[in-house]
Image: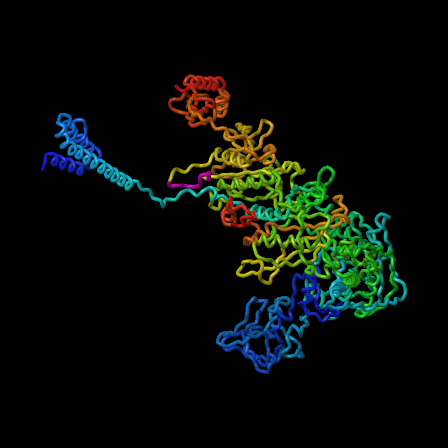
Amino acid sequence: MTDLDTLEADLLRQVAEASDEPTLDAVRVAALGKKGSVSELLKTLGAMTPDERKARGPLINGLRDRVQGAIGTRRDALAEAALSARLAAERIDVTLPVREAPEARGRIHPISQVMDEITAIFADMGFSVAEGPDIETDDYNFTALNFPPGHPAREMHDTFFLAPDRNGQRKVLRTHTSPVQIRTMRSHEPPIRVICPGRTYRHDSDQTHTPMFHQVEGLVIDKAANIANLKWVLEEFCRTFFEVEAVKMRFRPSFFPFTEPSAEVDIQCSRKGGEIRFGEGTDWLEILGCGMVHPNVLRNCGLDPDSVQGFAFGVGIDRIAMLKYGMPDLRPFFEADVRWLDHYGFRPLDIPSLVAGLTG
Amino acid sequence: MKFTLSWLKDHLDAEASLETISETLTRIGLEVEGIEDKAASLKPYVVAHVLSAEQHPNADRLRVCSVDAGDGRPVQVVCGAPNARAGMKTVFAPPGTYVPGKNITLSVGNIRGVESLGMLCSGAELGLGEESDGILDLPEDAPTGQPYAVYAKLDDPVIEINLTPNRPDCTAIHGIARDLAATGLGSLKRPTQPPVRGEGDCHVSVTLDFEPVDQGLCPYFTLRLVRGVRNGPSPDWMQARLRAIGLRPINALVDITNYLTFDRGRPLHVFDAAKVQGGLVVRRARDGEGLKALDGKTYALTSDTVIIADANGVESIGGIIGGEASGCDAGTVDVLIESALWDPVNIAQSGRRLGIITDARYRFERGVDPTYTLPGLDLATRLVLEICGGTPSQPLIVGEPPATERVIDFPWTETRRLAGIELSRAEMKVTLEALGFHVVGTGDRVKVLTPSWRPDVEGKADLVEEIIRIAGLDRIEPKPLPRIEAAVGKPVLTVMQKRTRLAKRALASRGLVEAVTWSFIPHDDAVLFGGGGTDLALANPIAADLSDMRPSLVPGLLRAGQRNADRGSADVALFEVGQCFATDQPEGQTIRAAAIRRGSASHAGAGRHWDGRTVTVDAFDAKADALALLASFGIPTGGLQIVAGGPDWLHPGRSGTLQFGPKNPVGYFGEVHPRVMKALDLKGQLVAFEITLDAVPLPKHRPTKVKPALALSDFQAISRDFAFVVSRDVAAGDMVKAAQAAERKLIAGIDVFDVYEGVGIPDGSKSVAIAVRLQPVERTLTDAEIEAVTARIVAEVGRKTGATLRS
């Protein structure tokens, strides 16, 4: 065994035994540093004869390469071990809860959601959205809609009145969204296609009535719109809104002062275990009123009933929300109980559309 | 409107089943609300013969009866009724029968050791009449085994329809029969009615005492005297029908008027002639007059009401209710029968004002057939003669029936135009004629004459309704509504509509929960929030605390927050987007968005969390909500100013106003004022914001959708921090504005990153640290240039706010 072999064995042993970076570095300096044992050997090459150098050169350089390689390998191993040790120490409890995202906590009220659903459907059929004030004149709420003063039909609406003004006129809280029909017809030329969602008020309070509720009115005025079109619009609406393949609807002749002919519409459903399902069953559920706009109403808006015609309908928004989403009682809609809102409300990004579906 | 099947069939010759009739009524617009068919519901109850009734071995008050229920095999029944006895006829129900009066279903019982195979029943148990202390005790000749409903003539189904106010003709069973006959379901019976041959004149005079303008209040009045009547109970068949529809039989004369009210829609009145003094005068009541009416109540009258008076004073409120003093009773010998016509609007107003609801008012305010006034008097007379005997006078007729017939020029195509259905002219004509219209002419346009009982039919559209109502709306096939333009749809929402929707989604995305609260709030709440004016107070609120139109959404939300806290949800974050009212004019109504946060309900989350301490909400939570809402509208907010202070309902030192210029405030945020908290009895930490969406500037219209070119600098931005010491009254916003003003070109952003008061800072002062980001555009800045900018910033902030650099 030569002295080089001995040195190499000794150095490789030291490398192998180095348990951390500083120790390994000390071994490196002792071997390969300026004054290191291997560096000293390399320096001796300069003083050698060419033949000696030829013989010793490869041996000493080989020694240096192997020691250098061993140190590198050992350094990688130590770094790997150190990382493993660090990672082993760096642990979190991933089961700890994070705060619920605001988007997950927030809620949209069912009325707003259903209004958005209704708007999406009717916008697709070419309807715009019209609005009017909640505080109405007697003319807009009744007279222009062909409720003559003193007519018993006015009694059908339990009206909220405001105090009489200087002229003895008393404004009313609109009892339906139909005044928006008048406002629309008086300000827009036909063809007209609007829906008018909004708040309405009646002096009535029990399990199925609240003094404030929501309606959406629909109005189509052109030169040809007739009951056949009305039926199609309402069937398409109900089918799409209730998200069923088909609905069976029953149009019953009825009476509203502002439409002639008039009808109430029932929708066929089943009630099993307190759950209402549409498109099946044998029960009928009244969901809306509709009809051809009364000639007097057209005249009251400056339109000639012999040259333009159209239809109107009115749907209770709260009511169809209850039917679709199964709220048993109307009153909690307006009580702002966060438990109810959390349960029956909708997530903020559940935006109804016909592209993605009304409900997610 | 109620009637019985047999009563209907007096007027309708039809074989149709109850079910078919019911379906048809609903189909033609006479919506059936309910059918009460006692023959079906009482089917198991039969007349039974009690063969024996022995004392129960183990109970003093019970008897063990052997009962023959008609099948010849005696049944053992234990009965506790005191009147149960051998030989009696009563009513038996076997096990399995539902007992409506007790809401139970019978089963085979074992009562104190004795088996009982059914029940002997009282009237109350069958759901008929009052509670009694015994079982039904029927006459001896009651046929054993016959269904009780048949025996007791309870087997006439009662139909109730929901009559719409436009159909006075169907306040008569005859009118309902006419509608049904028009569908082809049967034929209308039209018994001939020869006029009554009277003897002598009616000795009581009648004067219609009206100013010319008031003639329409009672245009037509007919009266007949019938002498020598016997006014006992009306016949059983009449009593049974009246009872079936919920009327109480009184005596024959009164029952006849009630009967014809329903049978013919012709309200009548009967006076006891002996109690009438002098002639009858029909006139407006005089203020101060009153009447004790047949309902036992006394009514104070005004000149708005039309009455019938005699020498004694007011005897009847015309068309609404008669008076007690001149009413008919068992002692009545001579009767005056009145058949008159009254003004619908006046009847409706009088009835409403007096709070009197009668079957007569119900009909007169809808419109009674004027031409049936005299025939109605004759029919009533005939019934009186049949039932009570007597000798009739000639009728006294004052005034005349107003003309009712309208002529409608009707093109047959109108049905197709309005209803979108093609019906044959023959079918349409048959329908109209069956309903009593006369069709004159044969061409494309005809004249249609309306019958006197249809005041609701005014024009072509009404005729179309009549035609399709009888044809059936189900025959109209749905047809697509063509688009106005054959093109992809255009956006339909207005800016405000989009904002309203966006506001809801934006606020809900911040963890707020949408509430919908009443538009009316307590008066005191309205006052606290700047409202409560008389023009926005309801004249007839449904409850004292729902009295005033809301000037703001915040009070409703604050109260809702407290209700939730009272229920155990202390940390609530609620918002509402909805209408508020400044005046009663349309322009006074605005759409606002508001939110409240209570307790620890911050954007990050509510309640305690392992990650950090619980913080209560403060004004900055409300400010963040408000700014997030404005940001969601996508309008430039560079012009938005935030100034200290807000409305009276916010804490004066912890609130701010959001404004686009001093004259255009759009909203407020901050802590709720302690005085408001106290007034509304609110607890806890509460912050709120409210923004009026209508006040937020509209986005500028841009001709293209192209976004402005993006200018990115190739040079590194640098940041410089400045720590100023400044009076604590100086707003950080003013310091930022001053720094911004020092250098218009290079400053790309300024952040306030530290605000500190305390040790090391003089009393009354604070330290405010800002970081200014400089973005070179043309070349890298030299140290000298940077120095120059920083010096300008320090100088400008110092000049405008008195701030000095912290040493």
Q: Quadrant of residue B400?
A: bottom right
Give residue B103's position: percent from left, percent from top: 56, 66
Residue B545 drawn in magenta:
no
Give residue B498's position: percent from left, percent from top: 59, 40
Front one among A252 and A63:
A63
At 64% across and 74% down in the image, what residue appears? B148
Answer above or below: position of B152 versus A27: below
Give residue B383's position: percent from left, percent from top: 80, 68
Give residue B363's position: percent from left, percent from top: 75, 57
Residue B542 falls left or right of residue B572:
right
Answer above or below: position of B495 versus B720: below
Quadrant in which the C terminus of chain B appears: top left
Q: Number of labelled discs? A: 0
Answer above or below: position of A247 versus B649: below
Residue B34 falls left or right of residue B601:
right
Front one among B702 and B146:
B702
Residue B606 drawn in magenta:
yes
Give the main secondary structure of the magenta stretch: loop
Residue B210 falls left or right of residue A160:
right
Front one among B308 and A278:
A278
Query: Which residue reaches farthest bottom?
Result: B72
Answer above or below: position of A261 versus B719: below
Query: Which residue reaches farthest left?
Result: A1
Quadrant in which the N terminus of chain B appears: bottom right
Q: Magenta span covers which residues?
A: B601-610
Describe the colour scheme in one phrase.
Answer: rainbow
Q: Quadrant of residue B231?
A: bottom right
Query: Which residue reaches farthest right?
Result: B200
Front one among B503 and B571:
B503
Residue B449 falls left or right of residue B555:
right
